[in-house]
Amino acid sequence: MTTTMRLTPHVGVQRTGSETVPRPEPEPMFAELAARWASAGRTVPGRPDEEWTLLARRSPWPLR
């Protein structure tokens, strides 16, 4: 006999009608780590990366 367990996401998923589950606050440890990365000029998950944006806007082909 096989039992299948269905996992449903809870963060930001629409439940019924217009009711949604609020996003939880970030863990303090992640918030501190993200602040350290940002102050060091590193990429932080969930925040825009300006260097990537500039690279992605460029044409991959050289101009002739």
Image (cartoon, rainbow, N blue to C red):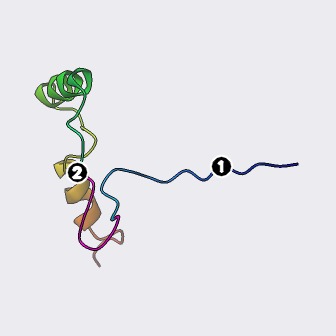
Q: CA distance from mark 2 to mark 1?
A: 24 Å
Residue at which label 1 appears: 5
Three-letter residue code for mark 2: Pro
Q: Quadrant of residue 21?
A: bottom left
The reply to whether discs 2 and 1 touch (Cβ–Cβ < 8 Å) is no
Label 2: state its secondary structure.
loop
Q: Is residue 18 magenta?
A: yes
- Left or right: residue 5 versus residue 46 is right
- Magenta includes 34? no
Q: Which residues are magenta?
A: 15-22
Left or right of 42 in this view: 4: right
**Image quadrant where residue 43 sits:** top left
Mark 1 residue element: loop
Q: Residue furthest bottom?
A: 64
Q: Residue 42, relative to residue 17: is it above or below?
A: above
Dot label at residue 22: 2
